[in-house]
Amino acid sequence: MQQTRTALAERIAEQRRGVGAPRALVGEMRRSVLLVPTAGGGLWSAWSGGVRWICGFTDEAALARFALLHGSGDQPMDYAALLGARIVDEVVPSLDEPAGLAVDIATEDGSMFFPPVVGIVADGVAVDSGEAEEGRGHGR
């Protein structure tokens, strides 16, 4: 039995096909519960391009694909279930570095990155707002 995709996964697929609306995608991300792996008492993240990417997954199948690549053998991967809005509005600003949200990074042709820019994260931590450069050193 095939599992139906979440609304966010559907919006990502539309955007990747070039038919989606970016604002609708961001809105869906904010409303969606994402599964975020935990490690060492915090949320799992990765560095790329000078940005810390918090990794979230739209469902358990997407998380399982990631766990096969980054998990520790047959041990279950712990995770937190967080609203996308909480990640970009609370978690990202709490980090003292440019940070964004990477969704479904282990899903071939199904990943999407929400960078630390105005309209996705708070203006004070967005690398393109000007405020971040004055405030906490973002945008360097």
Image: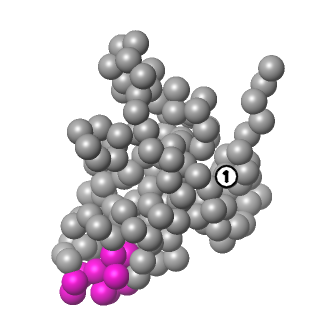
Query: Residue at left 50%, top 47%?
Result: 81
Q: Position of residue 57 (x, y in %)?
A: 53, 42
User: Which stretch appears magenta?
Assistant: 124-135
Query: Residue at left 52%, top 76%?
Result: 119
Evaluate whether residue 114 shows in this view. yes
Is residue 128 found inside the magenta-colored segment of the image? yes
Query: Is residue 97 depicted above or below 139 in this figure?
Result: above
Q: Amino acid at mark 1?
A: Leu
Is residue 5 toward the left or the right of residue 117 in the image? right
Is residue 64 toward the left or the right of residue 109 in the image? left
Residue lying at the far right in this picture: please name it.
1
Q: Quadrant of the N terminus?
A: top right
Is residue 65 found inside the magenta-colored segment of the image? no
Identify the colour scheme used: one colour
Q: Quadrant of residue 92?
A: bottom left
Q: Position of residue 55 (x, y in %)?
A: 43, 46
Evaluate whether residue 111 shows in this view. no
Q: Position of residue 80 (x, y in %)?
A: 45, 44
Number of numbered tags placed on the structure image: 1
Q: Position of residue 105 (x, y in %)?
A: 49, 40
Q: Nearer the viewer, residue 98 or 31?
A: 31
What residue would you read off at disc 1? Answer: 8
